[in-house]
Amino acid sequence: MIRASGITVRFGSHAALRDVSLQLDPGQRLGIVGESGSGKSMLGLTLMGMLPSSAKLDGQLHVDGQDMSTAADRQWRSLRARRVAMVFQEPASALNPLRRVGDTVMEPLRLHLRLDRKAAQQRMLELLDETGIQEPALKARQYPHELSGGQRQRVLIALALACDPALLIADEPTTALDAHVGLRITELLVRLARDRGMALVFISHDLAAVARTVDDVAVMYGGEVVERGPVAEVLRAPQHPYTQGLLAARPPLDAGQLRRRLPVVPGNVPAMADLPLGCRFAGRCHVELPRCAATRPSETSLSPGRSAACHHLPDPSI
């Protein structure tokens, strides 16, 4: 489904993504986590072929069996029309406020699948029903502002599913929703991926949402993948100091512990121009070694399917 090797995205002399490699098979669900500015959304846009014109892409990228490393816009549009789709994080801005939601969902059905209006309308109602919208015929006649945030997000998912994609990229789909609605959306994405055999890339800073949605997780920082593996293993025993810091900063479930001050990862994600030459987490890490800022750590295999990039990990060759 996705085979990415050494993906680097540059804006001038600065790299927003550096040497990112990923593999995603049909039906697999992959989570991408990290702070704002870590490169999560940039990776999603790369996989969709939606990078700004000023960006330069290096590396190998195969999506749905096609080599898209140097693909032209026309090739990307064809792929996005039928095989790859994205759910954006803010449905209020992603949906046209001047169009009824039913017409919005019908548009790709008529444009790409060449359905007549009657067939497109029937398929649109089926998609709204499949994504859990009650009274789909009524909701289809309404405008985005007349729907709740959760309903708008479900409309966006229905729109993304219209052409039966093999890959769905969900970029922070629960950020603008309350906890209860966000839970329903993640449950919906899991069900749809299973029922359709569809690959899912779930991008989020919400570790709880990631834990209940995906099979595997990649932790990003400064445009690099610093740790990856099965989501249960990574969250149970994180190996990279950055992953450890993210998990430690989560609010406790025990109400009796709410009074204690939560630990934080010191500092902020630096701008592209200020990233260290070596480990990009240098300057914020609590176990930093003298060589970290100047020497980039290599990715170390910890167990089958698990790896991390940190100078503090034991040398596997010893």
Image (cartoon, rainbow, N blue to C red):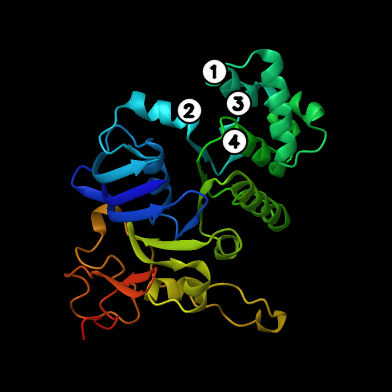
Q: Are marks 2 and 3 in contact (CB under 8 Å)?
A: no
Q: Within the image, what quadrant is residue 55 found in?
A: top left
Give x and y (percent) for residue 78.
41, 26
Q: Are marks 1 and 2 in contact (CB under 8 Å)?
A: yes
**For residue 104, side relative to residue 118 (left or right):** left
Q: Could you tell me which secondary element the residue under label 1 belongs to?
A: helix
Q: CA distance from mark 4 to mark 3?
A: 18 Å
Mark 2 or mark 3: whose residue is earlier in sequence: 2
Q: Nearer the viewer, residue 132 or 83?
A: 83
Q: Are marks 4 and 3 in contact (CB under 8 Å)?
A: no
Q: CA distance from mark 4 to mark 1?
A: 14 Å
Q: CA distance from mark 1 to mark 3?
A: 17 Å
Mark 1 or mark 2: whose residue is earlier in sequence: 2
Residue 81: which numbered mark, if any?
2
Give the residue pinned by disc 3: 96
Residue 111: which numbered mark, if any?
1
Q: Within the image, what quadrant is residue 285 found in?
A: bottom left
Mark 4 or mark 1: whose residue is earlier in sequence: 1
The quadrant of the image that shows the C terminus is bottom left
Give the residue pinned by disc 4: 161
Give x and y (percent) for residue 229.
43, 67
Mark 1 or mark 3: whose residue is earlier in sequence: 3
